[in-house]
Image (cartoon, grey):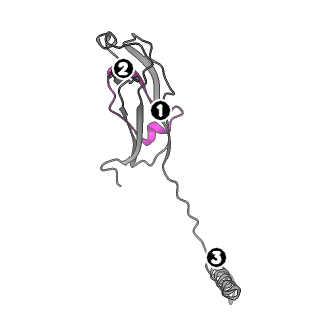
Amino acid sequence: MKRKIGKAVLLAVVLTGMVMSPTTTQAANGEKTETTTVKTTVESVYNLMIPVNPEVEFGSEQTDIGSITVKGNIDTAKKVVVSASKTDFTCTGRSPFSFQLQSDGADFTKMEVTDTEASTDNGKNKQLSVVIPQTTWNTVKPGTYTAVITFRASLENIPDAGN
């Protein structure tokens, strides 16, 4: 068994040496020049920053909860698309209630970020608010309620951008 393993290791070393060995060239008379190509691949990379555990004060109809920000190095033929989904506010033994997640006075559906926007010092950001009408607050019973906002970011091709 040791002999077979030893032969396999020796074969792997020889094959690696053949693959990794430099190109050699011979020059019979004078000088010869050879070139090599060095390659690297840079993938798109970005950071998504979201609000951390904001609190909504009871009775507040609009609460700024912070902003989402995308910053990074994105291929010019791509964009980052950020969307959000949310749960209702829930509390054990109590009726749940819903809220609106808004940005710029409208329901937040998504944010698209291009390479130019993501590469600035501050990236691209969008301020978010939780909106709960007074009529909803009037029906909420005492308790500690929680809701979850899930942000999803994806790198997508820009149509007709030479993908």
Instruction: Name the spot of residue 88 as percent of width and height, x first.
Output: 35, 26
Q: Residue at x 45, y 13 (%)?
A: 57
Q: Quadrant of residue 56?
A: top left
Between the C-alphas of marks 2 and 3, the distance is 68 Å
Residue tagged 2: 94
Amino acid at pointer 2: Arg
Q: Quadrant of residue 108?
A: top left
- Amino acid type of the residue that numbered disc 1 sits on in the rendered structure: Thr
> Gap in Å between the C-alphas at discs 1 and 2?
34 Å
Q: Which mark is residue 160?
A: none
* Depth check, front residue: 96 or 26: 96
Q: Amino acid at mark 3?
A: Met
Residue 132 appears at what percent x and percent y?
Answer: 34, 16
Q: How far is disc 1 from disc 3 in space, using C-alphas?
A: 44 Å
Which is more toward the observer, 131 or 18? 131
Q: Tell me the crowding category of disc 1: few under 14, some 14 to 19, or many 20 or more residues within 10 angstroms, Cα based.
A: many
Ranked by sequence position, the earlier of labels 1 and 2 is 1
Within 10 Å of disc 3 (Cα), the crowding (few <14, some 14-19, many 20+) is few
Q: Quadrant of residue 117?
A: top left
Query: Can you say which quadrant of the picture contains the C terminus?
Result: bottom left
In this figure, which residue is indicated by the disc labeled 1? 69
Residue 20 is covered by the magenta coloring? no
Q: Residue at x 38, y 24 (%)?
A: 90
Residue 149, image x and y in percent? 41, 31
Name the element at disc 2.
Answer: loop
Which quarter of the rendering shows the N terminus?
Answer: bottom right
Where does the image place residue 2, in percent across and percent down from the top left?
A: 70, 85
- Residue under circle 3? 20
Q: Which residues are magenta?
A: 102-131
What element does badge 3 sit on? helix
Lower position in the chain sequence, tag 1 or tag 3:
3
